[in-house]
């Protein structure tokens, strides 16, 4: 069985009129959101053993803040291509995860991360979490999937059981 955590990066500073969107840092609120995510993962024993993170500054800062809160030493990598990846590109990268990883985290961007969450939902889902998918995926929202798979190549659209879909506020409420 494989567990996949999909995380939209935390809130970033406003987009500059001119300049590089790729280099936008987390806002103070975003840093606080990332702390909440990390605490939620630690509290619910969901610390990843592998992470794939967009190379965009706000995604890297999200991961670094989350990682500081969790127990364990997740291995992983940063990939600039996730910044503009389509859902199919994210899924392709997930299929390349090491099979030794049992719980993996992806930190990426909308709209691709939300579309991937929607695409992965299978038939055994938490109905309350599935209702939330009809809306948006705000910054620092976490989706937790379980797949009856021995390897990451078996993670395909429609094959996942959505265990949770939580905004930072909901994560904080469940970590108390």
Image (cartoon, rainbow, N blue to C red):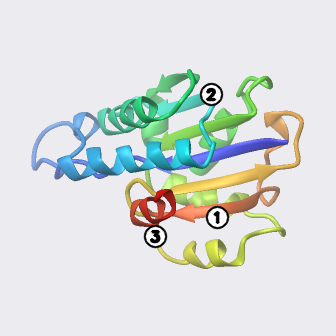
| Left/right of residue 150 with respect to residue 161 in the rendered view | right
Where is residue 141? Give x, y as percent: 46, 58
Q: Which mark is residue 50?
A: 2
Q: What residue is shown at x 81% (from left), y 49% (from top)?
A: 147
Q: Nearer the viewer, mark 2 or mark 3?
A: 2
Q: In which quadrant of the rendered image does the N terminus lie?
A: top right
* Image marks 1 and 2: residues in contact by CB distance under 8 Å: no
Residue assigned mark 3: 136
Task: Establish if 68 lies above or below 174.
Answer: above
Residue assigned mark 1: 118
Mark 1 neighbour density, 10 Å: few (under 14) some (14–19) many (20 or more): some
Q: What residue is shown at x 49% (from left), y 37% (from top)?
A: 82
Using the numbered discs, state the Cα–Cα distance from disc 3 to disc 1 in whole angstroms: 11 Å
Res. 131 image quadrant = bottom right
Where is residue 8? Give x, y as percent: 45, 50
The residue sitting at the front extreme is: 176
Sequence order check: which comes first, mark 3 or mark 1?
A: 1
At mark 1, the secondary structure is helix
Where is residue 42? Give x, y as percent: 54, 41
Q: Which mark is residue 4?
A: none
User: 121 or 3: nearer the eye?
Assistant: 3
Sequence order check: which comes first, mark 1 or mark 2?
A: 2
């Amino acid at each position: 069985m494989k567990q996949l955590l999909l995380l939209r990066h935390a809130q970033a500073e406003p987009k500059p009129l001119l300049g590089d969107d790729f280099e936008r840092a987390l806002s103070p609120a975003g840093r606080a959101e990332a702390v909440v995510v990390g605490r939620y993962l630690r509290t619910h024993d969901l610390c990843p053993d592998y992470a794939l993170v967009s190379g965009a500054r706000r995604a890297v800062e999200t991961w670094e803040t989350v990682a500081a809160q969790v127990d364990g030493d997740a291995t992983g990598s940063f990939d600039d291509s996730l910044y503009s990846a389509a859902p199919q590109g994210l899924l392709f990268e997930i299929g390349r995860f090491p099979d030794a990883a049992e719980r993996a985290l992806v930190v990426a961007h909308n709209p691709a991360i939300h579309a991937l969450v929607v695409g992965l939902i299978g038939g055994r889902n938490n109905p309350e979490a599935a209702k939330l998918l009809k809306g948006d995926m705000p910054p620092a929202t976490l989706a937790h999937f379980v797949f009856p798979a021995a390897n990451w190549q078996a993670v395909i659209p429609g094959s996942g059981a959505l265990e949770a879909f939580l905004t930072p506020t909901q994560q904080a409420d469940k970590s108390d």
